Amino acid sequence: MEPLPDGSMNPRRSAIKQVASGRFGVSSYYLTNADELQIKMAQGAKPGEGGELPGHKVIGDIAVTRHSTAGVGLISPPPHHDIYSIEDLAQLIHDLKNSNPGARISVKLVSEAGVGVVASGVVKGHADHVLISGHDGGTGASRWTGIKNAGLPWELGLAETHQTLVANGLRGRAVLQTDGQLKTGRDVAVACLLGAEEFGFSTAPLITLGCIMMRKCHMNTCPVGIATQDPVLREKFAGEPEHVINFFFMLAEELREIMANLGFRTITEMVGRSDMLEVDPEVVKSNEKLENIDLSLILKPASEIRPGVAQYCVEKQDHGLDMALDNKLIDLSRTAIEKQVRVFIETPIQNTNRAVGTMLSHQVTKRYHMNGLPAGTIHVKFTGSAGQSFGAFLCPGITLELEGDSNDYVGKGLSGGKIVVYPPRNSSFSPEDNIVIGNVALYGATMGEAYFNGMAAERFCVRNSGAQAVVEGIGDHGCEYMTGGTVVILGKTGRNFAAGMSGGIAYVYDVDGKFSARCNNELVDLYHVEEEDDIITLKMMIEQHRRNTESVLARDILSDFDNLLPKFVKVYPRDYKRVLESMKVEKAVAKHAKEPKMANGISVTTKKVQPDQSASRPTHVANAKKYRGFITYERESISYRDPKERVRDWKEVAIESTPGPLLNTQSARCMDCGTPFCHQESSGAGCPLGNKIPEFNELVHQNRWREALDRLLETNNFPEFTGRVCPAPCEGSCVLGIIENPVSIKSIECAIIDKGFEEGWMIPRPPLQRTGNNEMILLQKEGGHCWQWTIWFGCCRSTK
């Protein structure tokens, strides 16, 4: 992500960085290296939903990038916990602009009724860019229910947003973009005429690179190597940059032709010209359901609503950065930034000073990248009441000390810096009984230290990824969705502590013995602090807290630490504990393996030989694993008998199939495609009967043969014959066939029906009551048998 030696931006970095509700990996370094910062308020394919990344995909670079522990699952909260009003959104926009003054700040909204009013608030909150996302986006990790049933088409939200912004005189202050299954130049033209200036493409370019829309992006099993970190699968990626370039060239050519037909020279001329659109009468006539749909309001030109105002972005937002206190701090810290000389600054602060330290961190990060400056290089002491987002995205090398109190979002996205807050030295109240910082402190912190001599309000350390923090009491929902770091709480907590906490450790001083009732035990267990490492860590952090804040409470606890230790409770997430313990075992094994072995007094060093990657894969094993089964195991169908033997009798042509390791392994090769083609009769490529192939494959793998037979008989009433003579177009359309040999579906189907006859499950099932109707079937042989069976189930009598 760092710039190249000549100062230009590294083309390998992402120009657009997204800030979502989880804030995974959102640090000063992440934000500094971007051209656009986008706040994802919602996602078109799953509006209002959070997300979850399974632990088996949190490996390697993913764990490092997200500042989490490999193997521990990650949960994104549904809302942004620092956004509960339009003013909160304006604050986040201000914070991000301070974190990277040169970046454009974007807000992503989902197309829905009323989105125009929300967009107006977003623009008033000084967003530079607004994205209206349609409901039919192709996000692979979204739930199918969300993709199919949530959100609205981008056309509705885009038209409403453009008209509302024009009506309020705000359209000229922000760029308007839309996305959601844009595929052609015509889509771009329609979006432009409805008011968009920019257009987002995701699914279509991915498909040009080889995406087959498996909808397994979250499983790390993408068979074409796009949405996966698996090195074996990534080798199968066949995409080329030229494929995307060609797609966009052809897209632009189509758009140019449409523009020429409409008489437009530039995109700017087209924006908002909805008078160039009209309802297609032929489409309306072809579907009677469309007769009562009125699109006149959508197609109404915004220029008629408020003539004379801008129809596209013509001015930049004023973020008020020239009034920021950080400008003064940057000037006073110039020698530290340029020469790494320690500086100490004292200055008053007031609650109108927001995001203090954020722009200073940007300057340090821009020069020294992720590592920042040595600890304590820049030390700033404030006196007074700080505004919101005090120390947001504070980078390594900067210490902010505040004698007073602070508003919400203290240490938001803390990125390695140090924050110390304590009440005025001459105050007469007890800090442990009074709030010194507001809500949502240390939201999304990735590393650093924080010491608060007093209580914090609600949602303390929500989504903490790696910061160490000490506080003397908190409100409700503490350590919510926390994935890393260490937190010490020297006082009472509110309710719902540790909800969604999957990582990190918290030590709570259970003053009244009621902490267990306030803790959410869904993902965590509570322990006494007994292990030596825990005792050392706890005592060290309390000592650091006393040293930085001169806390009386910390001093009293340390003076009687051994007696008070039983009152401390260790909050330990189960998954986090499992992963850490397995890492200890692996580390011990690796250490033992490195120790030289002695033979006859001579040191013998052994080297582990890597297995030959070209070795053939097994076709049948005991207890085959479904995950990555299509990579781990090779295809093997049920074999045919020797021709010399089978021509002498009338028995089966194939070797008798019995449930066992072969079928268990072969069914494990089924990828559970999100969009399977093997059973799609309508496409003309899969099973002509529409057999529920993925379902009975899974049931066979689980050894649930009776249920597998029921699934097969739902669509195929004569599988004992059709399953044997069928040419198996299902295997030809198997998605796995793109990169591997397809699943042996035919063998599995034959095994199911054989098992049914063997167990006596295939019995006559005449209907209880017949209709009295007679049907004549003019088909011969097996086709006639199938139809006769079908009509028999339909309660009619048949004559063949």
Image (cartoon, rainbow, N blue to C red):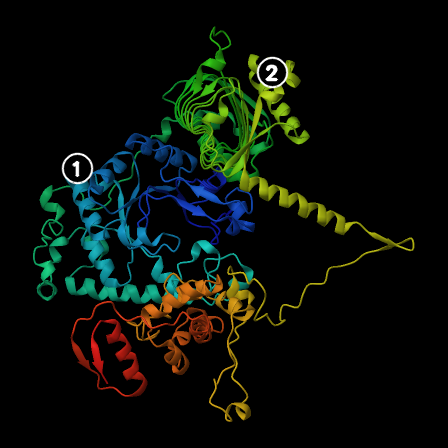
Q: Secondary structure at mark 2?
A: helix
Give the alpha-carbon distance from disc 2 to disc 1, as whole Å.
Answer: 59 Å
Foreground mark, 2 or 1, reads 2
Residue 665 rendering spot, x and y as whole percentages: 53, 67
Question: Can residue 412 be seen here?
Answer: yes
The reply to whether discs 2 and 1 touch (Cβ–Cβ < 8 Å) is no
- Looking at the rendered structure, the number of numbered marks drawn on it comes to 2
Residue 319 shows up from this direction? no
Q: Which mark is residue 230?
A: none
Residue designated by label 2: 557
Figure quadrant of residue 435: top left
- What amino acid is at disc 2? Ile
Q: Residue at x 52, y 56 (%)?
A: 229
Residue at 26 percent of width and 79 percent of height: 788
Please give left or right for residue 388 compared with residue 232 in the image.
left
**Which residue is the extreme one toward the right?**
600
Label 1 sits on what residue type? Asn
Image coordinates for residue 81, horizontal then vertical, percent: 38, 33
Q: Which residue is mark 1?
A: 168
Q: Residue at x 44, y 40 (%)?
A: 23
Q: Determine crowd level at label 1: few under 14, some 14-19, many 20+ residues with C-alpha closer than 10 A.
A: few
Looking at marks 2 and 1 on the same chain, the residue that comes earlier in the sequence is marked by 1
Question: Closer to the camera, 655 or 595?
Answer: 655
Tell me if 538 is positioned left or right of 518 in this view: right
